[in-house]
Amino acid sequence: MSKSIVQLLASDKFNGEDYSKWKSNINTILVVDGLRFVLMKECLTFSSFTANRNVRDAYDRWVKTNEKAQASILASISDVLTKKYESVVTVKEIMESLQAMFGQPSSSV
């Protein structure tokens, strides 16, 4: 993550207001950093005894990417929201929950 992105995340933390702007910013950051795919792809599951190397590598990549995306999101939200979401495992779950809490209903979009 570049220094300018870290500064943006720290200076403009989401506190429940202007969800659309925050979501747009976080999506841009996730795209630029190559992390957004964890919002669209489910984590692979595998047995460590039977999985081939490609499956293990894909799993490891997904887990690392999810952790990086989670760090970006947690750094960009208020301390209260960070406490709420720091134990949530996937970025997709965090984003879905924030959408449900702060996003506009689909009929008004």
Image: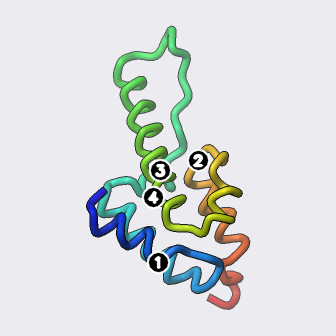
Residue 62 in percent (x, y) is at: 44, 39
Question: To which residue does mark 2 refer?
Answer: 90
- The type of residue carrying mark 1 is Asp
Report how far apart the C-alphas of labels 3 and 4 lie in the structure: 13 Å
Residue 109 in percent (x, y) is at: 61, 88
- Residue 87 lies, with reference to residue 20, above or below; the image says above
Helix, strand or loop status at disc 4:
helix
Viewer-nearest of discs 2 and 4 = 4
Question: To which residue does mark 3 refer?
Answer: 38
Res 89 → quadrant: top right
Q: Earlier in the sequence, mark 2 or mark 4?
A: 4
Helix, strand or loop status at disc 3:
helix
Question: To which residue does mark 1 refer?
Answer: 12
Helix, strand or loop status at disc 2:
loop
Question: To which residue does mark 4 refer?
Answer: 72
Residue contact between numbered discs 2 and 3, judged by CB atoms under 8 Å: yes
User: Which residue occupies 50% across, 77% down?
Assistant: 22
